[in-house]
Amino acid sequence: MTKKAATQFEALIDSLDLSTRSARRQVTSLAIGLLECIQSAEEDNVNNFPDNLQNSERYENAEHSLTALTDAIDSLTDAY
């Protein structure tokens, strides 16, 4: 995420009224959807690594990212 995008995202989050359970559930649902989109792109990335790079640090980092995304989605889904 670029610095500009991060700043815009922070401003969006700050502008939300999360005082109701319904609002928090909506934001959680949106976060899950966003993470699922990122997870899908990361899965495509991991699945399309050339064979000769599948033992590389870059590949391991991509797999680690995919695992972290899956764990985050599972945690949010459980909390939802």
Image: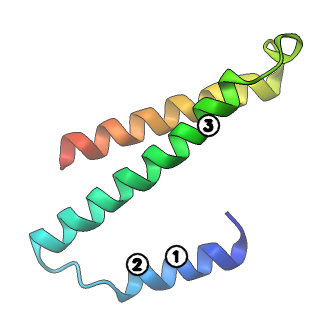
Residue extending farthest left: 21
Asked whether, in this view, residue 19 is left or right of residue 69, the answer is left
Seen at 25% across and 43% down, the residue is: 77
Check whether the beta carbons of the residues at disc 3 and disc 1 lie within 8 A of each other. Answer: no
Q: Which residue appears at 52% of the width and 76% of the height?
A: 9
Instruction: Please tell me whether residue 57 is drawn above or below residue 15 in the rendered image.
Output: above
What distance separates the C-alpha of mark 2 from that of mark 3? 24 Å
Residue ID for mark 1: 9
Amino acid type, label 3: Glu
Marks 3 and 1, Cα distance to the nearest angstrom? 21 Å
- Location of residue 41 (image quadrant): top right
Residue 46 is left or right of residue 38, and the answer is: right
Task: Give the quarter of the image for residue 17.
Answer: bottom left
Within 10 Å of disc 3 (Cα), the crowding (few <14, some 14-19, many 20+) is: some
Name the element at disc 2: helix
SS class of the residue under badge 1?
Answer: helix
Q: Amino acid at mark 2?
A: Ile
Rendered location of residue 67, percent (x, y): 51, 28
Say which mark, if any, is on residue 13: 2
Badge 1 crowding class, 10 Å Cα cut-off, few under 14, some 14 to 19, many 20 or more, is few
Amino acid type, mark 1: Phe
> Mark 2–mark 3 contact, CB under 8 Å?
no
* Whether residue 4 is situated above or below residue 40 in the rendered picture: below
Which image quadrant is residue 25 in? bottom left
Q: Are there few (<14), some (14-19), or many (20+) residues within 10 Å of tag 2?
A: few
Q: Could you tell whether 31 is left or right of 55 in the image?
A: left
Q: Earlier in the sequence, mark 3 or mark 1?
A: 1
Q: Are marks 1 and 2 in contact (CB under 8 Å)?
A: yes
Q: Residue at x 49, y 39 (%)?
A: 69
* Above or below, comparing residue 12 to residue 2 in the picture: below
Query: Disc 3 marks which residue?
Result: 42
